[in-house]
Every structure is written in C-alpha cells, then in structure tokens.
Amino acid sequence: MSDTITTSDIAAPQDAAALLHRFLRRLRDRRAAQSASRPQQPADANDEQRALTLADAAMSDCLGDDDWLRRPRQVAVVGPTQTGKSSVVNWMLGAPVAEVSPLAGFTIHPQGFARGGDIDAPWTDRLFPGRRRTPRAELSRDDLVAYSLEWVAGDGCDPDAAFQVVWDTPDFDSLAATSYGDAVLESIALADVIVLVLSKEKYSDLSVWRLLRLIEPLARPLVVCVNKLTPDSAQPVLRSVRERLSEFGGEYRGAPVVALSYLERASEYPPSAAELRRVVREQMEAVDRGARAPGACRLIRAHWDAWVAPIEAETAAQHAWRDVCAEAIRAALEAYERDFLNHPQRFDTFRRAVVELSQLLEPPRTAAVLGSVRWLA
Ligand SMILES: Nc1nc2c(ncn2[C@@H]2O[C@H](COP(=O)(O)OP(=O)(O)OP(=O)(O)O)[C@@H](O)[C@H]2O)c(=O)[nH]1
Ligand SMILES: [Mg+2]
C-alpha cells in the first residue's frame, strides 16, 4: 500500500472509509511520536490521543468482511483496577475461568472467554489488529501486545448464550495502565455491549467518567455494575452513580445499573449475578450492529477539529515561512540590482571580478579571448 494518501482511488463508500482509517492511523502514529519526544503533555493532549486510538479501532471494526460482521456477540467487561472485573467475568460465565487477584493491575491483556461460536473461525483473525493471539497460560508481562481467546464450558447459567464471548480487560487507572491502556479501548471498539464495573471505592474516579465521555459517541449499549456494596453504602453510592449518568445524553443517561453486594468470602457467588446476566442479555438482544459505523463517525466528528488543528497550524506556519523567504529573496535581488548591477562604479568593479573568475574557471587558451570579448561587451 502506498504511503501517500490521495482521494483518487475512492470508488465506493467503503474506499472512503478505508482512506479515512488510514488518515486516522497516520494521525495517531504522528501524535504518538510527538508525545514520545515530549513526555510532559497536557492532560487533554492525552485524551485526544486516546480518542484517536479508539477511533482507529472503531473504524477498523467497521471495515470488516462478512465473516467479521457475523461474528458472535461480544461483551467487554471494563473498569478501574480491583473493582472486580475478572470476578464479574466469572459470575457472568458461571465458571471460575478468569484469574482473580488482590494485586492492583493484575489483568494486563484482553482475555476472551467464548461459550458459543467457533474460536478458530476466520472472524477471529481480525480480532485486535496488531496484537498476537497467545494461549492464556503463555500471556506474559514482557509481551503486552498479546491477547487470548479460549473456549469455556459454562455450568449452564446462561443456556441461550446471548453473550457468546466475554472479554476480561486490563484496568485504565493504575500507574502501569499507560503501558497497556490501549487494550481497553480496543476491547470497547470490538464489543456489542460494555459492562462497566465500579466499586464502592472507585465509583467517582475521574478516570471512569473521562472514559465514559470518550466512548459516549459510539453509543454502544452500556451496563453499569457496582460491586462490593455494603448494606450502608449501597443506596447513596447507587444514587450518586445514577446522578452522574443522568448528566450524559442518549444511551448512557438511562443505562441500567446493577448492584452487587460485598461478599464475605470472595469465592462465594453474588445473588445479583443472575440479575446482571439478565440485564446484559436484554441489552444484547437490542444490539444493532448497523449503528456501529454512525457511532464511529460521531466519535470522529467530535474530535476532528482538535486532531487537525496542529496540522493546520503547521501548514499555516509553512506558508508563512515560504512568504517570508520569498520576500527576503525579492528584497535581496532588488538591493543587488540597485547597488551592484545598476551602480556605475560598483558595476565596473563587479564586472572585473566576474571576468577574473571566469578566466580562472575556463580552459587557459580560450580565457584571454573570452575576457577581451566580455570586457568589450
Ligand atoms: N471479599 C470480597 N472480595 C471481592 C469481592 N469482589 C471482588 N473481590 C476481590 O477483589 C480483588 C480484585 O478482584 P478482581 O476480580 O481480580 O478485580 P479486577 O478488577 O479484575 O482487578 P485488576 O485485574 O487488577 O484490574 C480480588 O481479591 C477479589 O477476590 C467481593 O464481593 N467480596
Ligand atoms: Mg482482573
């Protein structure tokens, strides 16, 4: 594929989408290179970089073939660290498949668990472009550009398997998340339904509401799940979460909120897990994959001006520089003409110098002849 982006190959809307995707990828790589050379960036620059990563993944998702478009239904379980994402994955699947740990930032790769569909079918080739599919047991902290997908046998909690693949994802708020946070955005771009897991401690973190603002234009169905609620905290925390959601428009304003009470022993099964599965199933039934492309366009439109502003500023600076140079050359030529070419004494001195120079540069025999001709001219 050529490196130059042109509009000449656009024959169909799909071509235009592919071109836009390439442009976004270029923008993303360019900004990533700039941030690497300038580590101290303002927070909103980082937000724009994340928006580009999400838009890149969302566009990539829209450009699929038929296998990809007919892939099994996907749920992405996302949230800050230690809220219980991996636990929720297990409760949804009815099997302790995702590894749970009290260590913050424990899950660092997207890990898919499938209960339906063929996990070696062609649609899986397009999962997480740029990441290597790796057996879950071989996922390593030394290789963050990896993901896993495996088949699990559930215990029949959800026999109709309305959600066929559940993705456990890394956190987006821990110190180390800057090194693997893109995986969360890529998982969101892939998902049909997003389950946002909060907890009593982490429901009001800025990172949570920033992420929701970022993904809102995609309008993917959202289920908010508040984990580790104690009897005294449940009502006020749930009220606060609903109030914050009410500040959003569209889908997120009335997003379902499921409460999961704190378990004395983490190995127990929360009674409201069945409610969570019911709500996710309900959201899944209403999924319209045709709405994904307009969602990606809304996201791109929301950030377009901020993305292209630095390029426009650079182009304007280049034009201004060209104008300054052109003016400087024009002024220099004018001065040269006035002070040397058209100046009676200096022109004479100048002509001698030119003749001497040409004699030095030309073959010895012709130099004298040329000199006298030039002198007479
Ligand atoms: N006692 C108790 N522990 C819980 C409950 N829910 C989750 N935990 C514990 O909280 C810790 C974190 O749970 P995880 O499911 O691993 O959380 P996570 O969000 O996946 O964490 P990261 O992968 O680190 O981002 C684990 O030790 C769980 O056993 C609960 O309701 N009660
Ligand atoms: Mg985890």
Image (cartoon, rainbow, N blue to C red):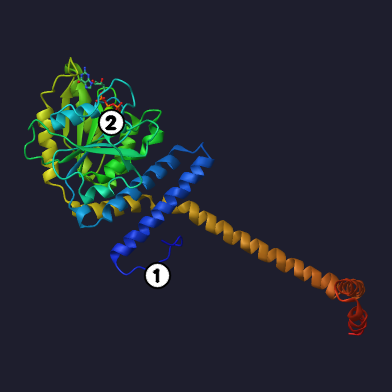
Q: Which mark is residue 359?
A: none
SS at mark 2 in the image = helix
Q: Residue drawn 66% across and 61% down?
A: 324
Q: Which residue is mark 1?
A: 8
State ligand 2's quadrant: top left
Residue in view at x 13 percent, y 23 percent = 270
Residue at 37% in and 45% down:
53
Q: Would you call the spot at circle 1 few (<14 residues within 10 Å), some (14-19), or many (20 or more)?
A: few
Crowd class of label 2 (few under 14; some 14 to 19; many from 20; radius 10 Å): few
- Please indicate, yes or no, whether residue 79 appears anywhere in the rendered image: no
Amino acid at the residue labelled 2: Ala
Please identify, in this view, whether the residue under mark 2 or under mark 1 is nearer the observer.
2
The percent position of residue 334, horizontal first and vertical second, equals 76, 70
- Asked if 375 appears above or below 360 in the picture, the reply is below
First-in-chain label (2 vs 1):
1
Would you identify the image quadrant in which residue 88 lies?
A: top left
Residue beneath the point at 28% across and 41% down:
187
Horizontal and vertical percent position of residue 30: 47, 49
